Image: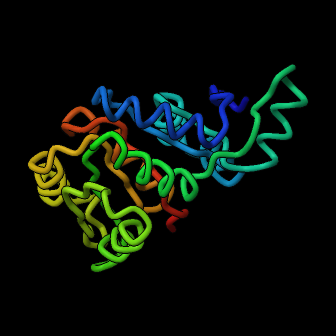
């Protein structure tokens, strides 16, 4: 649908797929398009290319789930939001000893998110956090610094909360430089 191949999986199945990919250090971009994202995809050729190239595409919107059930015999079983995927993947990562890195938000936001996740699952192995400055995506030196910071930590899974479509485009442009497994984009839309 919309030129994208949505994975017909539940939230738990999606999390398990990403945990296995993290364990195998299988690099790839994870996107969770909703109707707003579909509109952006159709208006912006770069964003379309990014979403079409994603390794994992999960439906983050009931209208997409409903349409999939109309257009396809089986359809998508349920919505899989980035916001729901993040805590589930983080929790399951502890069972497998995976290393996590969180990038995004204003200073202190990533650390507060990690503290909340560790309050529920203390065994989560967070190897780094980063709060990029505004406009970092247009600054090659700042992007290089973030890539190097992440690569030094060698995470199995990278979580990006930079806003859509900024996070997806940045991940797409730097994916080949990043020494990570799955790159899970989970942030809200940025302006």
| Residue with the most extreme top position | 73
Question: Which quadrant does the N terminus fall into?
Answer: top right
Q: Is residue 191 left or right of residue 73?
A: left
Residue 138 percent location from the top left of the image: 27, 58
Which quadrant holds residue 57? top right
Q: Judge whether 56 appears above or below 47 on screen.
A: above
Which quadrant holds residue 65? top right
Residue 188 percent location from the top left of the image: 54, 63
Instruction: Please name the residue shown 34% across and 44% down the image.
Output: 171
Q: Is residue 149 left or right of residue 46?
A: left
Q: Judge whether 88 appears above or below 27 on screen.
A: below
Instruction: Please name the residue shown 45% across and 48% down the image.
Output: 89
Viewer-proximal residue among 24 and 181: 24
Instruction: Please name the residue shown 50% across and 35% down the image.
Output: 16
Viewer-proximal residue among 118 and 163: 118
Q: How many marks?
A: 0
């Amino acid at each position: 649908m919309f030129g994208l191949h949505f994975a017909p999986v539940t939230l738990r199945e999606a999390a398990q797929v990403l945990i296995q990919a993290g364990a195998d250090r299988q690099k790839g971009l994870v996107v969770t398009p909703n109707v707003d994202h579909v509109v952006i995809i159709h208006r912006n050729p770069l964003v379309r290319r990014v979403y079409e190239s994603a390794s994992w595409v999960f439906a983050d919107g009931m209208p997409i789930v409903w349409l999939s059930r109309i257009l396809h015999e089986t359809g998508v079983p349920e919505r899989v939001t980035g916001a729901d995927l993040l805590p589930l993947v983080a929790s399951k990562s502890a069972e497998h000893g995976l290393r996590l890195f969180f990038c995004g938000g204003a200073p202190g936001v990533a650390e507060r998110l990690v503290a909340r996740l560790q309050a529920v699952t203390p065994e989560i192995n967070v190897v780094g956090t980063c709060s990029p400055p505004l406009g970092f995506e247009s600054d090659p030196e700042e992007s290089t610094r973030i890539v190097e910071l992440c690569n030094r930590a060698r995470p199995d899974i990278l979580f990006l909360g930079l806003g859509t479509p900024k996070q997806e485009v940045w991940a797409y442009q730097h994916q080949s430089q990043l020494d990570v497994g799955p790159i899970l984009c989970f942030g809200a839309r940025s302006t």
